[in-house]
Image (cartoon, rainbow, N blue to C red):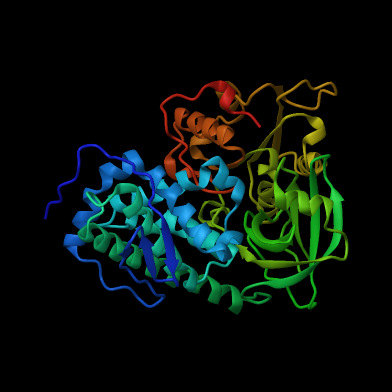
Amino acid sequence: MSLSLPARLVVRAPAPWSLLGARGLVVGAQPCRRSFSSTPAARLTQPQKDIVKATVPILETGGEALTTHFYHLLLNNHPEVKPLFNQAHQGSGRQPRALAASILAYAKNIDDLTPLLDAVRRITNKHAALQILPEHYPLVGASLLGAIRDVLGEEVATEEVLEAWGAAYGELADLLIKKEETIYHDLESARGGWRGGRKFTVAQKIPETGIMTSFYLEPVDGRPILRHDAGQYIGLRAIVNGVEQRRNYSLSDSANDKYLRISVKREPGGAFSNYLHDRVKIGDELEVYPPVGEFVLDKSRADDPLILISAGAGITPTIPMLESALEAGRQNITFIHCARAEDVHAFRPVTTELAKQNPETVKVYTVYETKDPHHVADATGMLSLDKLKSWLPHARQADIYFLGPKPFMKGVNFYLKSMGVPEDRIHYEFFGPAEELEDNKEVPEKSAKA
């Protein structure tokens, strides 16, 4: 089956629209006649797959315009879903870019989703941390098809195209709903686990640096706590300035039976982080969603060297990963952290003490971007390829995990690939929407900064 598409995408100004319930989107004067439900979708046909694949060139050139308008439709028509989205990521364009990349990848791989399974696992874990539920999917589906029709125009977004994308979205939604229900069921069934929100009390609030504070959260009900894997994160729900908001935060301490700990960096303009720093007091209660996440140590490689690389707040999951690795008896561990300066280097006493206690097992390296008057760093400036080669001669045989700001991660990823580290030994996670780390061929040294 073939589909004739314009050689050049014309992005149109969106027409006036309104929403009829959750199922009928009106675009201008004509309804986008699609309905979605949380019941299993009809099987996507091969002709419909061919149509979706034929739209790939359009998504490659205009996908971000489409997803930006999609979020406009979704959030304006359904303000009840706003708590599920970080508005800073909307304003910066990170969320629309990430969604555009995901939609494009789905269209390209629609005949065989196997290459997307890792991404699906990351997405479903993020959804579980924010408590995305089956009833949210029809709202997303109607908004997506409305955006396709608005932005691409009737010349491209024909009934045939809308039917195909409606069926494709329905199949994807069905896949995600099933996998998310498995996560919710497993979390609820585990010892100390729960489904949905659970009240925790702020038992301690301890500054780590001038811009990072740790919150020790103990369950109000006094029942056991699910023992999380090092590197996982939780979801928090709170009313911030009269508005419900939800955020994910990495757990910064090893699993124990008494508390969960998060260590939150104050972000300029960050509504939730500033709320936690300025408003939340010892004794206050927060609603917590269970720990999830795929950024965890690969137990099948427990005998391989382990390398943990972080910058800024990226240290929050790597600290418990280091502690967990030592507790499991792993050998040959290298821990590298980059910070702007000594006064914003969180957990330095912890890593220093662990290295002192395990001199034959752990090597710790520190890079400060600015001057180092007390000479505690191993290097100043940016983390460079030369430094990584010097510190990590065994990199190609190691299991490597890194996390930090995107420019830093992009640089580290590039350097590791330059050193010949196999793809399957490189693991990373984003704070916020997943983005592309390899969008150009060369990475300037200044990018690997904290």
Which residue is at the front of the view, 434 or 275?
275
Q: Nearer the viewer, residue 324 or 194?
A: 194
Q: Measuring 30% from the left and 68% from the top, which residue is drawn there?
A: 33
* The C terminus sits in image quarter: top right
- Identified at 70% across, 25% down, the residue is 369
Say which residue appears at 64% left-offset and 46% top-offset: 331
Up/down of 77 relative to 270, above or below: below
Q: Which is nearer the eye, 390 or 210?
A: 210
Q: Position of residue 138 (x, y in %)?
A: 42, 69
| Viewer-side residue, 192 vs 116 | 116
- Identify the residue at image location x=43%, y=41%: 423
Q: Quadrant of residue 342?
A: top right
Q: How many numbered markers are drawn?
A: 0
Kindly tell me whether residue 319 is visible in this rendering: no
Classify residue 155 as left or right of residue 282.
left
- Residue lying at the far front in this picture: please name it: 29
Percent x, y for residue 221? 78, 78
Rendered location of residue 128, percent (x, y) = 55, 65
Placement of the N terminus among the 4 image quadrants? bottom left
Picture coordinates of residue 56, whole percent (x, y): 27, 46
Residue 235 visible, this angle: yes
Q: Is residue 321 left or right of residue 299?
A: right
Relative placement, left or right, of 263 versus 404 is: right
